[in-house]
Amino acid sequence: MAVVTTARRGRGALLLAGAMVALLAGLWGALALLGYDVPASDTTAADHGILMSLGFLGTMIAVERAVALDRLWAWSAPAASGVATVWLLVGGWADGGKALLLVAGILLLAVYAALQRIQPSLHNALMALASVGWIVTAALWLDGWQLFRLLPWLAVFLVGTIAAERLELSRLIGIGTGPRAALVAASALLVTAAITAVWSPGVGVRLGGAALLCLAGWLVRFDLARRTVRQHGVTRFIAVGLLAGYGWLAVAGASWLAAGYQVWGATFDTQVHGLFLGFVMSMVFAHAPVIAPAVLRRPVPYHRRFYCHLGLLHLSLLIRIVGGDALGSRTTWQIGGLLNELALLTFVAVTAAAVLAGRKGRSGTGWLPDASTRRLFAGLTH
Amino acid sequence: MDASHPAPLGIADWCAPALTADLVLAALHDVIDPELGVNIVDLGLLYDVRVDEGRDVSIRMTLTTPGCPLGGYLDDEIQTCLRQFHAIRAVEMQLVWEPPWSPELMTPAAKEQLGWRS
């Protein structure tokens, strides 16, 4: 049988390697930030936030869109962010690496513009708007701003991208224009908050908290995951990961709203890691069984063991944020943080093992024709 | 298998019922969008399925949005699904964006599965 490929194999794997470098370096730096005595982690610690948000998550998102557009030039966005990551890690003229990260964001915006030309849509326009969050973050970071000042813009990029994706999927469950408009309004509020935070971080972060709470409320009330969680297998796994993430989005939003602008300490930890680990990383864990085969063009059979790293992520975050940040135990916070890292490494290891196992399997998520199909096509099938 | 040098039909092919677009469409009910848990036929993603000379399958389909990265993934799933038919010589999948997908293309079964209110 001739196989017609819709994307070239191998390219996705190469660029995902760039994201993996950012992830591992970011995790190494996090060990130092958690107070563990690890050698030579100054650079990775200082750039931990950028490595995790733009280096890892940004590259992953850019790879997804490049796979979708399926044009050679679209791969320049994740390639640029991957090279920028390595540049920052190797050291030497750091502004060059930062500028390249800015270029990567602009290239991602160009990918969205190309997608919009193919088929204009509100959700794609919102994703393009979210990518402006990457551009502003990188531009201001290049200008010398501290990363804690840029959290609202990182939220615009990562939360805005996810919100736009959920808006797109909301068409499949037949919700009305009112709720869809509410999601757009909450996203617009998040952008407004980020703009405000440039001049007034105190007001901007609280406004951002209100936006995150609105988004969490919308997702819990209307999102597709509430319906698909009643299904089984990989579909339920994805829904569980999403719903758990929505809880952390609400926690982060409440913390942003109640405590406002923070630059360090326990509340800052809750604001940052509730959002980016609890919400965004949970999205990544949930969608990995779908995105990995789409990017790698290799089968990644779903297995119930995927719940182990998902569960560990949320349990370790509970330990970190409740036991560490809220109750003020530094040791508990350190243990929770270490377990966060273990969850991420387990996720990488389990997913890689599934990719290797899938080479022997038949399909992307473990599909096999059922007995009724076999009977229906008796005589035509092997 | 090289489409330009197809294998000769075997005895099983002569004994089997003819492969038709309807049969292929029925088989594609097994290709599931993993996030939705709904098959691509009921989602209304398939615009056209043809079987030429009883052996060459061509599929014209869309996705819910061009920004969705699952085009290649669904291509792989379709190839895997149809590999069970020994009569098939080649499967060609073409992604198109006109007309744009809309929820109206979903079947009542898909809508019911995703909790639409009737």
Image (cartoon, coloured by chain):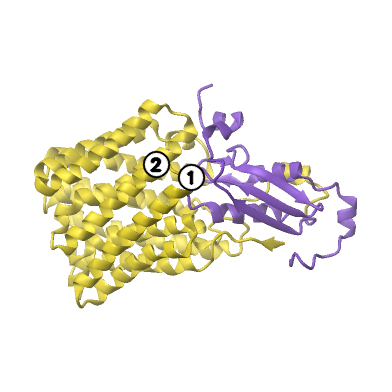
* Dot 2 crowding, Cα within 10 Å, few <14, some 14–19, many 20+: many
Label 1: element kind = loop
Protein chain holding label 2: A
Label 2: element kind = helix
| Chain that the image shows in yellow | A
Q: Position of residue A276 (x, y in %)?
A: 28, 51
Q: Position of residue A364 (x, y in %)?
A: 56, 55
Specify the quadrant that holds the N terminus of chain B.
bottom right
Protein chain holding label 1: B
Q: Colour of chain B?
A: purple
Q: Which amino acid, mark 2? A: His
Q: Seen from this angle, which residue lies furthest top?
A: B118
In terms of depth relative to the viewer, which is nearer, A128 or A271? A128
* Dot 1 crowding, Cα within 10 Å, few <14, some 14–19, many 20+: many
Residue ID for mark 2: A123
Q: Which amino acid, mark 1? A: Thr
In terms of depth relative to the viewer, which is nearer, A51 or A309? A51
Count of labels in the image: 2
Looking at the image, residue B95 lies above or below residue A74:
above
Residue A336 is drawn in which quadrant? bottom left
Looking at the image, residue A20 lies above or below residue B31:
below
Residue ID for mark 1: B65
Q: CA separation, marks 1 and 2?
A: 9 Å
Specify the quadrant that holds the C terminus of chain B.
top right
Q: Residue at x 29, y 69 (%)?
A: A84
Q: Residue at x 44, y 51 (%)?
A: A115
